[in-house]
Amino acid sequence: MHQVSARHEIIREWRSLPKQQRQTDEQAVLFAMQIKNKYKLFSSESADPFQTVKGWLLITNLSSAPKNSAECSGHPSFQNSSCSC
C-alpha cells in the first residue's frame, strides 16, 4: 500500500472512533501503537511506522482542536500554555 493511501485509511479509522476515544495525545499514541503494523507503510527499515502514524494522528488532533478561547479552557494544550486557539 502506498504511504498516502495508508495515511488516508489510518486517519479514516481514527476519525471513525467515537470522539471521546480520540481527544487526547495519549489516545493517539495508543491508537498508533495498535495500528502501526496493520498497513505495510515503508520499504526502508530506517522509517519507524509508529512514529510516522503518531505524527499523522497528532497533526489530525491539532487540526480539529477548539478554535475559540471558550473551548480552549478544556483543551490539553491550553493548560500547557501552548494552545494556539
Image (cartoon, rainbow, N blue to C red):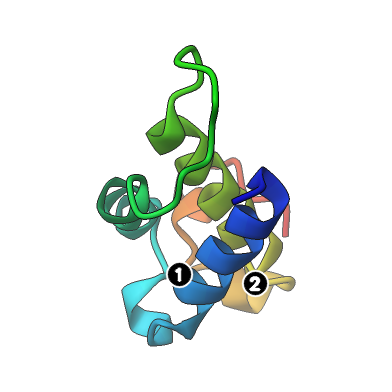
Q: Quadrant of the C terminus?
A: bottom right
Q: Is residue 60 left or right of residue 77?
A: right
Tell me the kind of residue under disc 1.
Gly
Q: Is residue 19 left or right of residue 77?
A: left
Q: Are marks 2 and 1 in contact (CB under 8 Å)?
A: yes
Which numbered dot is residue 74?
A: 1
Q: Secondary structure at mark 1?
A: loop
Q: Which residue has dot 2 on it?
A: 66
Residue 68's place in the image compared with 62, above or below, is: below
Mark 2 or mark 1, which is nearer to you? Answer: 2
Q: Residue at x 71, y 51 (%)?
A: 4
Q: Residue at x 70, y 61 (%)?
A: 63
Residue 26's place in the image compared with 13, above or below, is: above
Q: Residue at x 34, y 55 (%)?
A: 35
In space, the residues marked 2 and 1 are separated at their CA atoms by 9 Å
Q: Residues within 10 Å of mark 1 (few under 14, many from 20)?
A: few
* Number of numbered discs on residues: 2
Residue 15, image x and y in percent? 52, 77
**Foreground pick, 30 / 65:** 30
